[in-house]
Image: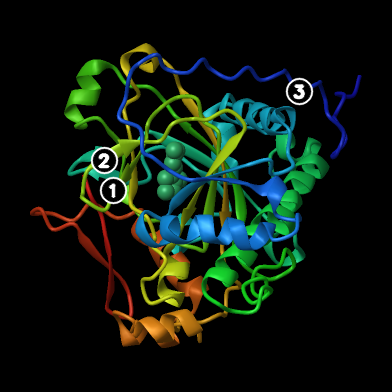
Amino acid sequence: MAAVQSMPGLPSKPLPKYEQEPESKFDLEWADLVTLDLSQFDTPGGKERLAAQLKSAVHNVGFFYITNFGLSQDDVDRQFAIGKEFFSLPTEEKIKYKADLMNGNYNGYRPKGSGEILPGKRDNVEMYNVFKFIPQLEREQPAIVNEHREEIERFQRKIAEDVVQKLLVLISIILELPEDYLAKGHQYDDVSECHLRYMIYRHRTPEENAEYQNLYSKGHSDFGSLTLLFRQPVAALQIRMPDGSWKWVKPHPGSITVNIADVLQFWTAGYLKSSIHRVVAPPGDQAHIDRLGLLYFLRPAYDLKLKTLDSPLLKRLGLKPENDTADEIKAGDWVRARVKGNQDKVPQGGNQEKPVIGGIKAKYYD
Ligand SMILES: O=C(O)CCC(=O)C(=O)O
Ligand SMILES: [Fe+2]
């Protein structure tokens, strides 16, 4: 008898319900971050109030929370369930969908150990990146993605066409630019490497954590425009505060943690901070958990240059770019060079700077 095959687009079995882990009971040093209630956005004067609330956060730490963004916890948990199913596949199966990391392309699977954390010590992070579903970015996908493609696309589009657009309006207001200024170059149909990411950090033993100085991911900035991190109850993400101290990010129910990434820092001559963050071993009561994550990475249209925007605020402040060479670099080339650089060995001899492109360096922190 012929083997029964599942049809693309039709689930072969129902998706198991994903249960989020309980929060840590540990009393950690949490970062004090502003929370934007996005349900205020369409109320009279709402955008202006939210922009005022956001201004110092994006200038000083580059991290904030949003709530009431129009996706339910069930919608979010379905995505966690998809990620969990994918990561439970055998390595031989996952590796069939490997991204072309050596050319800086994140579209697909990134196996664990692709990068170094400390000299000779490789990471244990797996990712599956689902790029926007536009013809230029199509690739072969695993069955779990094909079976839930419509739902994944709906989820991506809600973020890309609504949530992110609101944030871009607020940032445009802060920069005293027309409200739709940043929407250009951030459309779902633009060729840009925006993606939804499923991610898993396999837990380590206390001995392994000691060898790795508790690091799961070195202090870094993100590469594109904005990063959205769906609530992750396993505490591990830390932010580098302006005074150089590290603070934990509290997983507030119903929130997304958002951070500013490199391209917005270039465009604003450093006014918006591409925030430094790292991932460390979770507290004792969560140390046994394989930490599953869900993120959305917003990237600008590939061909846009990194030149400082013509913003009245930046002009008034007299801000000048740190590197003139950035003017002619394409945002897409910057992102690709940074992805490629992440596969390299860590810089030796305490030097934590890595050349990226056009003589510009990226900094890393332990
Ligand atoms: O897992 C996290 O909390 C953060 C992940 C992260 O920083 C990244 O993927 O760039
Ligand atoms: Fe990051």
Q: Residue at x 69, y 61 (%)?
A: 45
Q: Earlier in the sequence, mark 3 or mark 2?
A: 3
Q: Nearer the viewer, residue 136 or 30?
A: 30
- SS category of the residue bearing label 1: loop
Under mark 2, the amino acid is: Trp
Type of residue at label 3?
Answer: Leu
Q: Which residue is denoted by mark 3 in the rendering?
A: 15
The answer to which of marks 1 and 3 sits earlier in the sequence is 3
Which residue is found at the position 47% from the left and 61% from the top? Answer: 55
| Quarter that holds the C terminus | top left
Which residue is drawn at the image coordinates 72% and 63% (left, top)? 188
> Which quadrant of the figure has residue 123?
top left
Ligand 1 within 8 Å of the CB at mark 3: no
Q: Rate crowding at label 2 as few (under 14), some (14 to 19) or many (20 or more) other CA atoms within 10 Å.
A: some
Residue 281 in sight from this viewpoint: yes
Q: Position of residue 328 (x, y in %)?
A: 43, 87
Select label 3 or label 2 by which is in front: 2
Checking the image for residue 241, the label placed there is 1
Disc 1 or disc 3, which is closer to the eye? 1
Q: Residue at x 74, y 67 (%)?
A: 189
In-image side of 101 versus 144 (left or right): left
Q: Residues within 10 Å of mark 1 (few under 14, many from 20)?
A: some
Q: Is residue 86 depicted above or below 277 in this figure?
A: above
Q: Secondary structure at mark 3?
A: loop
Circle 2 residue: 246
User: Residue 239 location, x and y as percent?
Assistant: 34, 44
Instruction: Give the camera-side residue of 105 and 264.
Output: 264
